[in-house]
Amino acid sequence: ENRGRTFAKYAGVAPALDYHLLMKEEGSGPHEMLEIGARAACLRSGQPHACDIIERRSTAGAGEGGEGSAAEYYVHYVGLNRRLDEWVAADRIVHDTSGAGVRDGAELGGRRATRKMKRRIDDMNALQAGASHDEALEKEHEESTKVKNIQTVEIGRFEVDTWYFSPFPDEYAQQRKLYICEFTLKYMKRRSTYLAHCERERSRQPPGQLIYRCDAPPLRRECLAAGMEQPKQLSVFEINGSDSKVYCQCLCLLAKLFLDHKTLYYDVDPFLFYVLCEVGADGGHRIAGYFSKEKTSSEHNNIACILVLPQHQRKGYSKLLIDCAYQISIREAKVGSPEKPLSDLGLLSFRSYWTQILLQTLSDHRGNLSVKEISMMTSITTDDIISTLQSLNLIKYWKGQHVISVSPKIVDEHLKLHPPGTSLRCDPSKLTWQPPAEDALDK
């Protein structure tokens, strides 16, 4: 029963605009049992792609030993991100990987990728802050999370394919699909339980304090064509992890389905969470993304983790969340930076934001500005300013210090390439957040 709602199927390997029903690509003929760890090829987008067999299981109707097409394999596509790992039917497996036409992810770097391919490959919101690059720890992490447990989640009117393992309690982790309330983020195993919860639940917004509200920008035509509804407004709520533990724990478990290296699941007390919502015509505040930060950070981090849910990506929300974090830092009179190290794509997201802010600052102040002065104006750390200006070739190291070397003409030329008006920003006049008393941070 859909209660008259229109559901959009969202595949996690595709951009937020690409809603579709997943179609099985069938091979032909029976297959012998494959061993775990074997190298094979799997039909993907109609082409055989090299893969490693990570796990196998028998499905309903399988013969003895799970043989034939009733067996399923969990595969990792060689050269592609782990979020594309999936369970596939045995009839998609091609045993001979020596034949012509078998591809791996390395090939994509050697030829021109179409716009659609780039969207399917790139994780446009992959800030996986704090990820360890130590090889041993990385291997241990991959081993413990190598098999994606939850395959899909239904949240509101969206059914979303997940990307990664998330440590839900055992009784939920065994489910292929979970149902998640878009207001409370409580997760359920059965649709009947979910519908009953929706009927009796009166909360229409996250817990915590509303700190920001603005009119929602018009959705692009592609979003509307994909069946997305135009929100009336956008809102941001500040939620204290120690005040709303269950909500924040549910948020972290949901986020882990789309972030590979997220490690915060249950110990939410030391963190503040800033949840971005779309406000619909019915007045409900439905989660679109969030960022978190430590209440007290010895390293002056203003973002610990950031995520825009897959079905809401490509709407400019990541820049809005980043800008919100920096506007809060400005009101705190502190400089801030996301937790390091950043993933490559995470760095690109922040570098794009820093570039627009720094170019606009240089354009507004035509006189000579030092790196420290810019840092005080923007709350961007001096290290982030220097690395960003170096990428633009706008700073030099002279007599033991970094000197900004730029003319108004050069700034204007760069602004044409990075126009600030194209990004969704946090309007300071609509941000009601004020710094808390020092003792309040310990609660």
Image (spheres, helix red, strand yellow):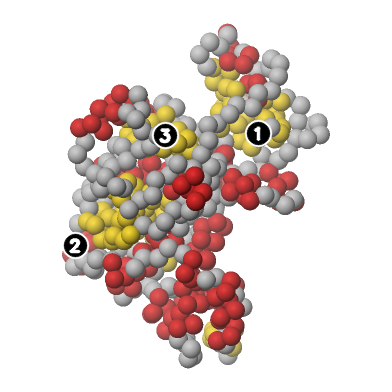
Q: In this rendering, would 25 be left or right of 145? A: right
Callouts 3 and 1 close, C-beta under 8 Å: no
Distance of label 2 from label 1 (alpha carbons): 53 Å
Q: Total label count?
A: 3
Position above or below: 278 against 154: below
Label 2 or label 3, whichever lies nearer to me, is 3
Amino acid type shown at disc 1: Arg
| Residue 109 visible in image | yes
Position above or below: 424 against 171: below
Identify the residue shown where x is 58% and y is 48%. Answer: 119
Mark closer to the chain start, 2 or 3: 3
Per the rendering, the mark at residue 1 is none
- Per the image, label 3 sits on a secondary structure element best described as loop
Locate the N terminus by quadrant: top left
Amino acid type shown at disc 3: Phe
Q: Residue furthest top?
A: 64
- Per the image, label 1 sits on a secondary structure element best described as strand
Label 3 or label 1, whichever lies nearer to me, is 3
Q: In which image quadrant can residue 361 be found?
A: bottom left
Residue with the mark numbered 3? 7
Mark closer to the chain start, 3 or 1: 3
Label 2 or label 1, whichever lies nearer to me, is 1
Distance of label 2 from label 3 (alpha carbons): 42 Å
Q: In which image quadrant can residue 406 be found?
A: bottom right
Label 2 environment density (alpha carbons within 10 Å; few <14, some 14–19, many ≥20): few
Residue with the mark numbered 1? 44
Residue 223 or residue 193, whichever sits in front = 223
Pinpoint residue 135: horizontal percent, then vertical percent. Answer: 57, 49
Identify the residue shown where x is 40% and y is 65%. Answer: 425
Pinpoint residue 218: horizontal percent, then vertical percent. Answer: 42, 56
Residue with the mark numbered 2? 440
